Image (cartoon, grey):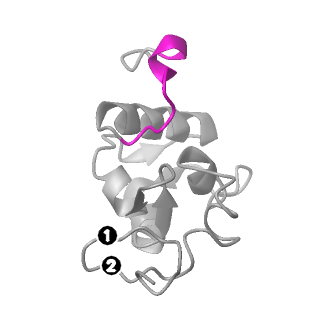
């Protein structure tokens, strides 16, 4: 057992606030990366959204990137340049770009569909 959860990947010095693979996380490894982050926002009520406030609230939450890697949300947002997101689409474009540029995008072949410089 690592980080207090049987299937959670080890992240140095991290005690997850909830099970990375539970309902607040990857839902039994059915959701990864963006999908887990998306569950944390209400598209109709949370925008515009401050990056700093979002990370302050959810920064320690585990985000499963792939079958082997779980990182705290703050680690993903360290590479997001925008300070505020006008809407859901703007947030996910910025997060996706940061994830692709920093080897946090688990989907093989993503570059075929999205140019990291255009997202």
Q: Residue at x 43, y 36 (%)?
A: 94
Say above or below: 87 vs 15. above
Residue 81 falls within the magenta-colored stretch: no
What residue occupies the far bottom of the structure in this picture? 4
Provide the residue span drawn in magenta: 104-114
Residue situated in front as seen by the camera: 103 or 82: 103
Q: Are there few (<14), some (14-19), or many (20+) residues within 10 Å of tag 1?
A: some
Say above or below: 61 vs 108. below
| Label 1 close to label 2 by CB (< 8 Å) | yes
Q: Position of residue 49 (x, y in %)?
A: 52, 53
Say above or below: 93 vs 12. above
The answer to which quarter of the image holds residue 13 is bottom left
The residue tagged 1 is 11
Which secondary structure type mostly characterizes the magenta part of the structure? loop
Q: Secondary structure at mark 2?
A: loop
What residue occupies the far right of the structure in this picture? 44
Q: Residue at x 58, y 50 (%)?
A: 32
Q: Residue at x 47, y 67 (%)?
A: 62
């Amino acid at each position: 057992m690592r980080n207090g959860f049987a299937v959670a990947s080890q992240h140095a010095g991290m005690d997850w606030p909830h099970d990375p693979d539970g309902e607040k996380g990857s839902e039994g490894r059915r959701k990864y990366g963006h999908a887990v982050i998306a569950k944390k926002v209400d598209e109709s009520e949370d925008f515009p959204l401050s990056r700093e406030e979002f990370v302050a609230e959810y920064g320690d939450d585990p985000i499963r990137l792939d079958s082997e890697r779980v990182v705290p949300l703050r680690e993903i947002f360290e590479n997001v340049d925008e300070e505020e997101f006008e809407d859901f689409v703007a947030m996910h474009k910025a997060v996706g770009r940061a994830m692709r540029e920093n080897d946090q995008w688990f989907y093989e072949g993503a570059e075929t569909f999205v140019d990291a410089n255009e997202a």
